[in-house]
Amino acid sequence: MKDQLEALVLQMVKSNILYSEAIYEFKKRFILAVLQEHNGNQCRAARALKMHRNT
């Protein structure tokens, strides 16, 4: 997993993606993956992420 993340970071750097864009994309994809793991249930996904549902 760590190797995949490092490869992705290198690819993003080579593509000249801004730091803010990289963070935005990571957060979005991470949250969507957790949401999918919880079958779209926002409350359970938020609990798993230890964040408020409206965040």
Image (cartoon, rainbow, N blue to C red):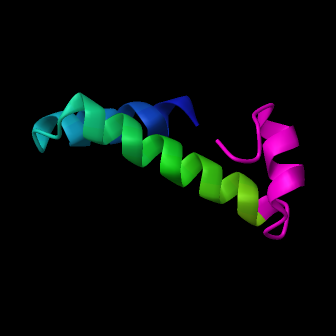
Foreground of the two, 37 or 47: 47
* Number of numbered markers: 0
Image spot of residue 26 (x, y percent): 45, 43
Q: What is the magenta range? A: 37-55
- Residue 25 in picture, x, y percent from top left: 39, 48
Residue 39, magenta (yes or no): yes
Instruction: Name the quadrant of the C terminus.
Output: top right
Which residue of the protein is positioned furthest toward the bottom in this rendering? 39
Judge by depth and name the residue closer to the eye, 30 or 41: 41
x, y (%) of residue 52? 76, 38
Left or right: 15 with respect to 6?
left
| 28 relative position to 34: left or right | left
Q: Residue 5 in the image: x percent, y percent?
A: 45, 36
Q: Which residue extends farthest front?
A: 54
Q: Residue at x 89, y 52 (%)?
A: 44
- 27 relative to 16 in the view: left or right: right
Residue at image x 51%, y 42%?
27
Name the side, left or right, on which 17 lies relative to 8: left
Nearer to us in this view, 43 or 12:
43
Q: Quadrant of residue 37?
A: bottom right
- At horizontal 54% and vertical 29% (from top left) the residue drawn is 2
Residue 50 against residue 45 in the figure, above or below: above
Quadrant in which the N terminus is drawn? top right
Above or below, 15 against 35 in this view is: above
The verdict on residue 20 being magenta is no
Q: What residue is at 23 percent from the left and 41 percent from the top?
A: 12
Give 24 or 10, whichever is nearer the viewer.
24
